[in-house]
Image: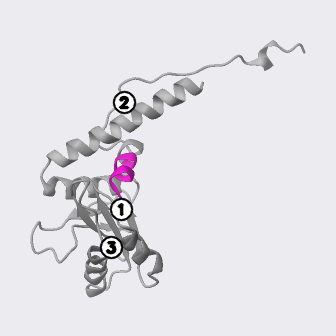
Amino acid sequence: MNQIEDAFAQLNNKLIDDLLQFIGEQDPKFFEKLVVDLLVAMGYGGDFEDAAKVTQFSNDGGIDGIIKEDALGLDKVYLQAKRWKETNVVGAPDIHKFMGALMSIGASKGVYITTSSFSKAALDVVASNKSLKLVLIDGKQLAGYMIKYNVGVISQHSYTIKRVDTGYFEEE
C-alpha cells in the first residue's frame, strides 16, 4: 500500500509543478480569472448569478477579483492575484499594499494568491494583523487546491483498491 501512496504523491508533485509551469506561460489576466474560478469551485460565491467577477485589468485599485458570499452581495471576499516567477517572493510591502486597498474600500476579508511564495515578513504581517481576515495562498497551495477542486485538471485514470471482506467469510 505504501508503494501506491508514494507513487500517488510523486504524480501529484509532478502535476503541481506542471500546473505552475502552465500558469506561468499564460498572461496575467488569465491568472486573475483562474483565481476567481478556483474560489467559486471551492464553494465561495454560492450558485447564484454574478457571484464572482474579475476586476478591470489596469487601475483596479489593488483588487483583482471579488467574490460575493451571499446573493445580495452583503459580504464579499476581495482577491489579489500575482503570477510571479518562483524566485520573486511576495514581501511585507506587497501585503501592506493589499491591506491598504482593502481598508480603502471598507473590506474585511481578502485572499492574496501568488504562483511564487511569501517571505517570512509577509507571513508575520498577516499573523499579527487583527483588523482584517487575510488568507495567503502560495504557488504549491494554489496548485494543490486546483487539483482538489478540479480546476484546470482532468482525471486520467482511477483505481479501486480492494481488500478481503472478512465479514463475508464468518460463519453465522
| Residue 20 percent location from the top left of the image | 27, 45
Q: In the rendered image of this protein, does residue 37 appear above or below residue 45?
A: above
Quarter of the image where the C terminus is located = top right
In this rendered view, identify the residue nearer to me: 142 or 93: 93
Instruction: Determine the CA span between mark 3 and mark 2.
Output: 34 Å
| Residue 64 percent location from the top left of the image | 21, 67
Q: Which sits earlier in the primary sequence, circle 3 or circle 2?
A: 3
Three-letter amino acid code at the position of disc 2:
Ser
Q: Which mark is residue 45?
A: 1
| Residue 165 percent location from the top left of the image | 73, 18
| Residue 151 percent location from the top left of the image | 31, 44
Left or right relative to 1: residue 31? left
Residue at 49 percent across and 22 percent down: it is 159
Q: In the rendered image of this protein, does residue 26 appear above or below residue 159?
A: below
Does 140 lie within the magenta span?
A: yes
Sort mark 2 into few (<14), some (14-19) or many (20+) by Cα contacts within 10 Å.
few
**Residue position for label 2:** 155
Residue at 43 percent across and 74 percent down: it is 124
- Specify the farthest residue to the right: 172
**Residue position for label 3:** 73
Q: Secondary structure at mark 1?
A: loop
Q: Specify the segment rendered in magenta.
A: 138-145
Q: In the rendered image of this protein, does residue 135 appear above or below residue 163?
A: below
Badge 2 vs badge 1, beta-carbon distance below 8 Å: no
Q: Which mark is residue 13?
A: none
In this rendered view, identify the residue nearer to me: 46 or 7: 7
Badge 3 vs badge 2, beta-carbon distance below 8 Å: no
Three-letter amino acid code at the position of disc 3:
Gly
